[in-house]
Image (spheres, helix red, strand yellow):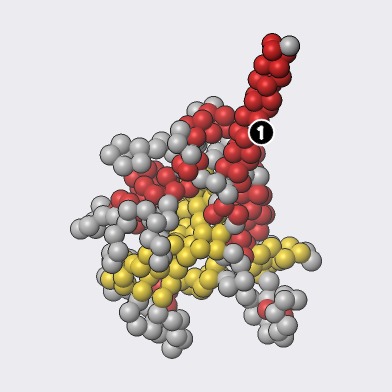
């Protein structure tokens, strides 16, 4: 009798442990729980998911902001993240390709078809993690179309102007990539203001109030930005987190006298579990060889903050 009871109790214990591990895995996969929150779980999670360390892919479109080669070199530096990332051209990837990777970083990809934008959305919906940088996807491909304000039923507008280059239309369907990123693109700084220097001083980088977000963990307050960046506006009705902000310390007035405000998102997350992150400045720009002071924490935490 005791033997039967012990066997039964052991069976119940195994089932309970299995249910707990299954729930833990599901919460981690969806991004609701970071694997680093449970000691030792990150290695176990990636062993179950990938059979080894997580895989990283850098996608290069050949045009736009970013230096994918420098990013790959920075990620691979053994004194910092020490991650070996693969690289691929934008025109060579499809959904099946990128699903083999756990973190995809899109750089230097200004021109992008609506079909490619949808591919990245589906990648995240299937469990992937995405880093979007700079002006990627802000130029439509031949045959594609932008959504006009007058065509968006939520705007109640008769103004026939594009909403922003990340809000597309495909036949009678709206592809709201801007809502997916939680920001709408305006312009590159050096397109609306004269950039007389290679890396003009732009302002102060302000952390979010808690200062403990994994993407900027350990970053000092009050660092400065030098160089070009993408000006974006947050979309208020979309769940997101502002992680890093550029304080321009005055209103930014464009060459055609538009007032764009005095603060701009530099790092903003979106999606369930922060599995989509937008960087207005490609991360490798903070460790460029010509900078007198390099902010390695931004590159390191882009990886560790997304993976762990």
Q: Residue furthest bottom?
A: 257
**Residue at left offset 54%, top offset 67%:** 183
Q: Relative to residue 47, is residue 212 depicted above or below? A: below
**Residue at left offset 36%, top offset 74%:** 247
**Residue at left offset 50%, top offset 28%:** 52
Depth check, front residue: 89 or 260: 260
Q: Please provide percent x and percent y for residue 184.
A: 55, 70
Q: Relative to residue 176, is residue 24 depicted above or below? A: above
Q: Please provide percent x and percent y for residue 12.
A: 69, 25
Q: Relative to residue 9, is residue 133 depicted above or below? A: below
| Dot 1 crowding, Cα within 10 Å, few <14, some 14–19, many 20+ | few
Q: Please provide percent x and percent y for residue 235.
A: 57, 71
Q: Is residue 73 left or right of residue 240?
A: left
Depth check, front residue: 279 or 108: 279
Q: Residue furthest front?
A: 1
Q: Is residue 214 visible?
A: yes
Q: Relative to residue 211, is residue 302 depicted above or below? A: above
Q: Is residue 244 visible?
A: no
Q: Which residue is mark 1?
A: 19
Q: Is residue 80 left or right of residue 64?
A: left
Q: Please provide percent x and percent y for residue 131.
A: 50, 52
**Screen quadrant of the N terminus:** top right
Figure label count: 1
Label 1, secondary structure: give it: helix
């Amino acid at each position: 009798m005791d033997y039967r009871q012990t066997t039964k109790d052991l069976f119940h214990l195994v089932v309970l442990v299995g249910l707990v591990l299954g729930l833990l895995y599901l919460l981690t996969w969806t991004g609701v729980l970071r694997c680093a929150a449970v000691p030792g779980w990150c290695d176990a999670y990636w062993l179950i998911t990938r059979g080894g360390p997580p895989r990283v892919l850098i996608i290069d479109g050949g045009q736009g902001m970013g230096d994918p080669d420098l990013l790959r070199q920075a990620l691979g530096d053994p004194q910092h993240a020490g991650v070996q990332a693969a690289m691929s051209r934008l025109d060579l990837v499809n959904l099946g390709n990128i699903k083999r990777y756990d973190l995809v970083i899109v750089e230097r990809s200004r021109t992008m078809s609506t079909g490619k934008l949808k591919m990245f959305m589906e990648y995240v919906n299937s469990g992937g993690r995405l880093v979007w940088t700079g002006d990627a996807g802000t130029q439509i491909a031949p045959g594609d179309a932008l959504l006009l304000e007058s065509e968006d039923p939520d705007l109640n507008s008769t103004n026939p102007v594009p909403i922003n280059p990340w809000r597309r239309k495909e036949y009678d369907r709206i592809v709201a990539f801007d809502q997916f990123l939680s920001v709408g693109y305006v312009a590159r700084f050096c397109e609306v203001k004269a950039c007389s220097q290679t890396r003009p001083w732009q302002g102060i980088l302000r952390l979010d109030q808690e200062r403990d977000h994994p993407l900027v963990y350990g970053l000092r307050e009050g660092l400065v930005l030098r160089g070009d960046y993408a000006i974006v506006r947050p979309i208020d009705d979309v769940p997101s987190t502002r992680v890093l902000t550029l304080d321009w310390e005055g209103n930014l007035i464009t060459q055609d006298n538009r007032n764009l405000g005095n603060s701009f998102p530099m790092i903003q997350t979106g999606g369930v579990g922060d599995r989509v992150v937008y960087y207005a400045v490609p991360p490798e720009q903070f460790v460029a060889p010509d900078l007198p002071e390099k902010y390695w924490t931004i590159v390191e935490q882009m990886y560790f903050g997304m993976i762990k």
